[in-house]
Amino acid sequence: MKKATARDLCKVIFYNQEGFALFKSANCYLCRALEPKIQRLIEKYKNINFYFVDVDDEDAQADMFRDYVDGVPSAILIKEGKFFPLKDPPNPDRESWFGYDYLDKEIIKFFKEEE
């Protein structure tokens, strides 16, 4: 997972690249517990670039996405010049908010190729 700024994500969107961006904070216990699940997704989806934006880092300019990111952890999926903020899961994981199965299902649904 690569560290990114909001401007980096704008470039990913502009250049029609595929990506998964996680907005997190070092002080967030949910974010820390989510890291192993994200690592499993990185290993599974090698064709998708995974990024993280540290919302506490002023240089990250995370507020650029404030209308789409509500707290941490939050995530957006990027494809074909567009991005989609992940909704809160119907049954949040108590330890990491986003469960592995929920993220996997959303990635499959979003990146599914047109038939």
Image (cartoon, helix red, strand yellow):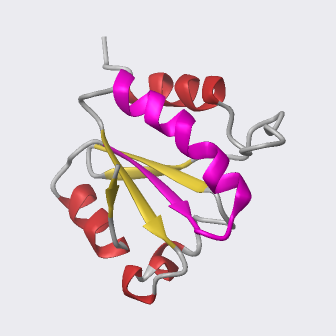
Report the predominant secondary structure element of the magenta stretch.
helix
**Residue 110 visible in the current orientation:** no
Residue 101 falls in image quadrant: top right
Q: Residue 60 location in percent, x, y? A: 39, 79
Q: Which residues are magenta?
A: 19-44
Residue 103 visible (yes or no): yes
- Whether residue 109 appears in magenta in the rendering, the answer is no
Residue extending furthest bottom?
A: 58
Left or right? Give the position of 75 relative to 99. left
Q: Nearer the viewer, residue 12 or 43?
A: 43
Question: The C terminus is located in which quarter?
Answer: top left
Q: Residue at x 47, y 77 (%)?
A: 62
Q: Is residue 96 left or right of residue 4?
A: right
Q: Observer-nearest residue: 95 or 48?
A: 95
Classify 25 as above or below 83.
Answer: below
Residue occupying the point 33% across, 66% down: 4
Up-down relation of residue 112 to residue 103 (above or below): above
